[in-house]
Image (spheres, rainbow, N blue to C red):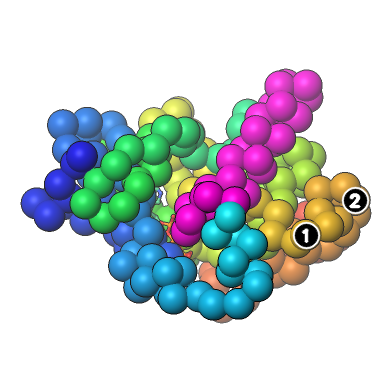
């Protein structure tokens, strides 16, 4: 079991902590924050009981991500497109519960990649590369990626490929019991449009919903 007490925490979301994987600088470990694990253990009632029987504990959300990842990858294969989701897969045991192993998306210097939010906050006109951003947008529509939590903090700029590319690190995977967005791409397209419009609001960019692309103001 990995002891993360000395590991370097690189980032923290509302749900997860992100650590450098000890001895594997190209990888990250994502653990559930303690508050989330405690909240899960305290849940009462029939729904909680049924979920407990499934035996996935607080890690059930991983299944939602993996299902989406696999579906998108399969579609990307058929359409010969890139997979717009950062690579992840295995899980390892740590003193903070199970950790999801992910490939660490790097910036140009090899440090942790900036999020789209970081780039937008930089305030410079050229901080967000529009070509790669709109290529990412097209992939999300064409592959019908379901992203209920489409925020600028869940998208990072990968500098390891020439010209750069944007990747989702979080926020994807159908939450609904009846997966309407997965089944009906038109419904998902409307949701993606709302998400991109939200991202553009208060940023240096403008969202053109008709052309489905970001534009300079
Ligand atoms: N594979 C990755 N490569 C580079 N950076 C990453 C990667 N995965 C996550 N990050 C960074 O860690 C931050 C938090 O990760 P993540 O979004 O998965 O956590 P979360 O708690 O689920 O987020 P939220 O607050 O949106 O619920 C991201 O905003 C991003 O900056
Ligand atoms: Mg996030």
Q: Is residue 87 left or right of residue 80?
A: left
In the image, what residue occupies the spot 64% across and 62% down?
50
The first of marks 1 and 2 along the sequence is 1
Picture quarter with the N terminus: top left
Which residue carries the number 1 mark? 177
Depicted 168 relative to depicted 216: above or below = above
- Magenta region, residue range: 54-81
Q: Position of residue 82 (x, y in %)?
A: 63, 29
Residue 63 found in image quarter: top right
Q: Report how far apart the C-alphas of labels 1 and 2 lie in the structure.
A: 14 Å
> In which of the image's four quarters is ligand 1 placed?
bottom left
Query: Nearest the camera: 156 or 53?
Result: 53
Q: How many marks?
A: 2
Query: Nearest the camera: 52 or 206?
Result: 52
Depicted 39 relative to depicted 5: above or below = below
Labels 1, 2: front one: 1
Query: Nearest the camera: 102 or 210?
Result: 102
Q: Is residue 68 magenta?
A: yes
Label 2 SS: loop
Q: Position of residue 209 (x, y in %)?
A: 80, 63
Residue 212 found in image quarter: bottom right
Residue 131 visible in the picture: no
In the image, what residue occupies the spot 44% across and 29% down?
161
Which residue carries the number 2 mark? 184
Q: Position of residue 164 (x, y in %)?
A: 47, 37
In the image, what residue occupies the spot 71% across and 27% down?
74
Label 1 environment density (alpha carbons within 10 Å; few <14, some 14–19, many ≥20): few
Residue 140 found in image quarter: top right
Residue 72 visible in the picture: yes
Residue 49 numbered tag: none
């Amino acid at each position: 079991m990995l002891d993360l007490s000395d590991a370097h925490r690189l980032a923290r979301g509302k749900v997860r902590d992100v650590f450098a994987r000890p001895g594997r600088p190209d990888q990250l470990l994502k653990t559930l924050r303690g508050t989330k694990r405690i909240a899960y253990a305290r849940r009462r009632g029939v729904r909680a009981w049924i979920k407990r029987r499934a035996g996935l504990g607080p890690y059930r959300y991983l299944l939602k991500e993996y299902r989406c990842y696999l579906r998108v990858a399969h579609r990307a294969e058929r359409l010969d497109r890139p997979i717009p989701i950062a690579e992840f897969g295995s899980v390892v045991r740590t003193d903070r519960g199970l950790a999801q192993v992910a490939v660490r998306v790097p910036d140009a210097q090899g440090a942790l990649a900036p999020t789209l939010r970081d780039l937008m906050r930089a305030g410079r006109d050229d901080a967000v590369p529009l070509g790669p951003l709109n290529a990412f947008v097209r992939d999300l529509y064409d592959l019908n990626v379901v992203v209920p939590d489409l925020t600028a903090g869940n998208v990072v700029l990968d500098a390891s490929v020439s010209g750069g590319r944007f990747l989702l690190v979080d926020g994807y995977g159908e939450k609904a019991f009846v997966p309407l967005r997965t089944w009906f791409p038109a419904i998902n397209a409307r949701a993606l449009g709302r998400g991109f419009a939200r991202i553009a609001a208060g940023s240096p960019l403008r969202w053109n919903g008709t052309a489905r692309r970001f534009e300079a103001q």
